[in-house]
Each structure stands twice: as C-alpha cells, then as structure tokens.
Amino acid sequence: QVQLVESGGGSVQTGGSLRLACIASGLTASAYAMAWFRQAPGKEREGVAVINGPGVTSYANNVSGRFTISRDTAKNTLYLQMNSLKPGDTAMYYCAADSSDPMYITFAPSEFRYWGQGTQVTVSS
C-alpha cells in the first residue's frame, strides 16, 4: 500500500520560507515521478514542481527561482524548499507520485495516481 504523508506547512509572513516534506512508503522514490501540487479555495489544483525518476526537475513559472524540489532516496522523502513566499502561494499543498512512466514530466493532476492528504501553507501580507 502506497502512502504519502506531508508535513512542514504553516503560517508565515511575506518573504518568509518553509520547507515541506513528503515521506513515501510502499514505493521507491527514485522509481517514481513525484510532484508537489497546490490548491487554493475556489481554484483548480495546479502543479508546482515535478521531479522524475532520473532527477530532472520542472517548475511552474510563478514559483521558478523561489522554490526547489528535491528527493532524498535514502529516506524516501520528497522536499519542497519555498523561499520568498508571497500571499499568492497560500494553498493546501499536496505530494503526488506515479510509476506509470518515471521518465515523464507533467503538471497534470490526472497523471498522478498516489496522493497525500495535504499540508496547509498560509502567507500573510
């Protein structure tokens, strides 16, 4: 049974930083494409950052240069370092994984089979 558990969310001021973590069980992180998504009230779920099996990364335009996705294969943990946070970053953040094609890079939520329960990030002005 694959389980993804997020942590590290919280409330910060504009310009602050947070580091999210996603502990994966029942899978080998390096064999999966993994991603961070976020969803704010009234908005669609959007891809934030993706890392594929070989470690190639991709970022949404509005977080590029501020966020960094990484993976610790020994700990089977996915991270999202978020710097220079803005109010527009406020959302529930979800960890996702898929093994269909670990080489693939995509921001489509429908392409990810496994999801965590989410961790809330709130950025105030």
Image (spheres, rainbow, N blue to C red):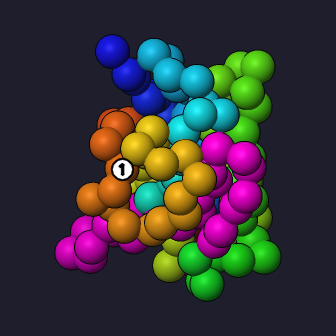
Q: How many residues crowd mark 1 within 10 Å: few (<14), some (14–19), many (20+)?
A: some
Furthest toward the bottom, the residue is: 61
Residue 43 falls inside the magenta stretch: yes
Residue 44: give x, y in percent of width and height.
27, 73
Furthest toward the left, the residue is: 42
Residue 5: give x, y in percent of width and height.
46, 28
- What residue sits 70% from the left and 77% below the top? 64
Residue 106: give x, y in percent of width and height.
48, 66
The quadrant holding residue 76 is: top right
Is 46 displayed left or right of 68 in the figure?
left
- What residue sits 63% from the left and 71% below the top? 59
In the displayed structure, 35 sits above or below 105; it is above
Q: Is residue 37 visible?
A: yes
Q: Name the residue that disc number 1 marks.
A: 112
In the displayed structure, 69 sits above or below 107; it is above
Is 52 displayed left or right of 1 in the figure?
right
Q: Compare residues 53 and 19 and report the one nearer the observer.
A: 53
Q: Is residue 115 visible?
A: no
- What residue sits 64% from the left and 44% below the top? 53
Residue 13: give x, y in percent of width and height.
65, 66
Q: Secondary structure at mark 1?
A: loop
Q: Compare residues 93 and 77 and report the one nearer the observer.
A: 77
Where does the N terminus fall, quadrant-wise? Answer: top left
Q: Amino acid at mark 1?
A: Phe
Q: Which residues are magenta?
A: 38-59
Is 30 displayed left or right of 83 in the figure?
left
The quadrant holding residue 99 is: top left
Where does the C terminus fall, quadrant-wise? Answer: bottom right
